[in-house]
Structures are given as structure tokens and as C-alpha cells.
Amino acid sequence: MNKDDYTDSFDDGVNTFTLIDDEGREYEFELLDFVDYRDRLYAVLLPVMDENTSSDDDGGVVIMETVFEGNEPVFDFVEDEKLAEAVLHEYSLREEDTDDDDTE
């Protein structure tokens, strides 16, 4: 999904994006958060499951590098598994900190 088109919407406080790949296929994601990692910005996305989603789809999170062309974000899949794991780990650490703050 290099140079994706996207639309965003807010539904009950949930930020969702529809990304369109180079072949015109649409994919809907829930934005969990953005993560700054090593001076780059990454989006942590959760695929939105619906009745058309195959049972073969694992439903795991997707990590995409986010760059801005003007005011428009452009999302690019992170294919480096170690980088994706590092970004996801950074996201998890932040979520743990948020959870700790909520329990105090």
C-alpha cells in the first residue's frame, strides 16, 4: 500500500481509515496509535473484521511507516519483521504506562 489513498472517519471515538492499494482494493483499519521510533513515525493499525473477512486472516496488527506529503499522510507497509516487532514493542510499553496511570 505504497502511496495509499485514505479516508478517515470517527465512529464512537474510534478512528478508522480506509486504505486503497495501487490496484484499487480497499482495506479498513482502526488506528490504535502513532509511534515515534528512531526519528520515524509509524501507525499501529488493527484490521477491521467484517462479514467479508476470510477466516484465514489472522487479524493481527499492521505496522505502517507514515510520512507526510504536504498535509497528507502516506502509509507504507513495514516489511522488516524486526523493525515491526520493535515498533510494536514500543507501542506495548506505552500502553502499559497508560494502563498503570489509569489504575493509580
Image (cartoon, rainbow, N blue to C red):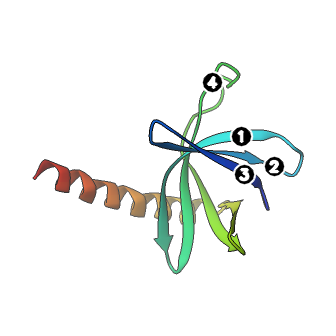
On the image, the x and y values in percent for residue 65 come to 63, 65
Q: Residues within 10 Å of mark 3 (few under 14, many from 20)?
A: some
Q: Residues within 10 Å of mark 1 (few under 14, many from 20)?
A: some
Give the residue displayed 40% in from the left and 64% down from the top.
90
In the rendering, which numbered label is found on residue 36?
Answer: none
Q: Earlier in the sequence, mark 2 or mark 4?
A: 2
Give the residue displayed 87% in from the left and 44% down from the top.
24
On the image, the x and y values in percent for residue 103 come to 14, 48
Q: CA distance from mark 2 to mark 1?
A: 8 Å
**Mark 4 sits on what residue?**
50
Q: Within the image, what quadrant is residue 93 found in? A: bottom left
Q: Nearer the viewer, mark 3 or mark 1?
A: 3
Q: Are marks 2 and 4 in contact (CB under 8 Å)?
A: no
Position of residue 27 in the picture relative to residue 88 (left or right): right
**Mark 2 sits on what residue?**
21
Give the residue displayed 41% in from the left and 59% down from the top.
91
